[in-house]
């Protein structure tokens, strides 16, 4: 599948893909807000661009609200900071260097450009994954030993809609976005999954077990519900 990206006024970045099975032009918007146009292989890309322009009103109506742009000095999770540099390159790229997430963009391309923001977002999630894999399994093990729980395996993933899970084999999955929460709330989620190794549901027995180890469990539950498992970098002003 051949794919190209185009910047269109008022719409932003549009992904146009040629597909051998397409017989007409099709438009879609992903849950993350990416605008996609699929066109037949024999159709020129400019037709896809014009098709997107003709649907601008519909796109703006249905495109989900986007988070504020990532910027210089924004903190990612517990350990990383965003740094933006310009260089003689053709397209944005990123790398993790110690405690920095370095975004290299073409000279003249603004930090707010959608391709730079997309690169920064993906790199920030890589940084969160690195932090989570280094810290969460150790913390889970410490809590299990402290409160007398046993579990099978632990893994870190990017989950949608929940902070963690535990299956009937006592294998625990933790969301990498946990690294954006205060440690008290991270511990709440980890202990929550450990209690699930004994009670898979949220029955009265589950909560009785939970409260026995964390008397503020229900208050902390409300605090956790105020957060969403999505990328939420902290601005420099927030940590000054």
Image (cartoon, rainbow, N blue to C red):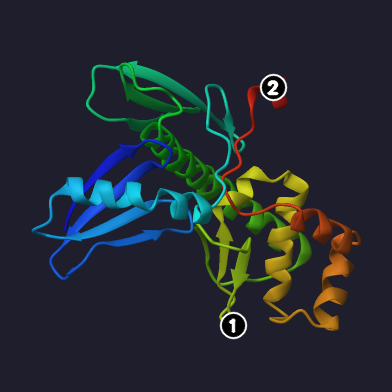
Q: How many marks?
A: 2
Question: Residue 168 has which mark?
Answer: 1
Name the one closer to the observer, 1 or 27: 27
N-terminal-most mark, 2 or 1:
1
Horizontal side of 101 relative to 240 (left or right) equals left
Percent x, y for residue 220?
83, 56
Q: Callout 1: 10 Å neighbours few (<14), some, many (20+)?
A: few
Question: Which residue is outermost to the right?
Answer: 215
Q: Quadrant of the C terminus?
A: top right
Real-space CA distance between mark 2 and mark 1, rounded to the nearest whole angstrom: 44 Å
The residue singled out by tag 2 in the image is 237
**Residue nearer the viewer, 235 or 64:** 64
Q: Quadrant of residue 217?
A: bottom right
Q: In which quadrant is the N terminus drawn?
A: bottom left
Q: Position of residue 123 (x, y in %)?
A: 42, 38
Residue drawn where x is 67% and y is 76% of the image = 197
**Residue plotted at (20% across, 50% down):** 47
């Amino acid at each position: 599948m051949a794919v190209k990206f185009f910047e269109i006024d008022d719409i932003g970045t549009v992904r146009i893909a040629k597909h051998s099975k397409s017989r007409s032009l099709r438009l879609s918007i992903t849950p993350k807000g990416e605008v996609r146009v699929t066109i037949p292989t024999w159709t020129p890309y400019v037709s896809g661009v014009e098709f997107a322009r003709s649907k601008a009103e519909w796109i703006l109506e249905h495109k989900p609200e986007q988070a504020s742009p990532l910027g210089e000095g924004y903190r990612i999770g517990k350990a990383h900071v965003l740094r933006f540099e310009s260089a003689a390159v053709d397209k944005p790229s990123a790398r993790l260097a110690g405690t920095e997430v370095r975004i290299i963009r073409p000279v003249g391309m603004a930090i707010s450009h959608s391709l730079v923001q997309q690169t920064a977002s993906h790199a920030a999630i890589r940084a969160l994954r690195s932090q989570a894999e280094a810290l969460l399994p150790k913390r889970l093990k410490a809590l299990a030993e402290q409160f007398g729980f046993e579990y099978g395996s632990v893994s870190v993933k990017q989950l949608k809609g929940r902070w963690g899970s535990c299956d009937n084999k006592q294998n625990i999955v933790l969301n990498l976005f946990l690294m954006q929460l205060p440690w008290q709330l991270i511990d709440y989620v980890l202990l929550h999954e450990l209690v699930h190794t004994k009670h898979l549901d949220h029955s009265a027995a589950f909560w009785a077990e939970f409260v026995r180890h964390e008397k503020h469990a229900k208050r902390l539950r409300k605090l956790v519900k105020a957060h969403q498992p999505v990328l939420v970098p902290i601005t420099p002003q927030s940590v000054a």
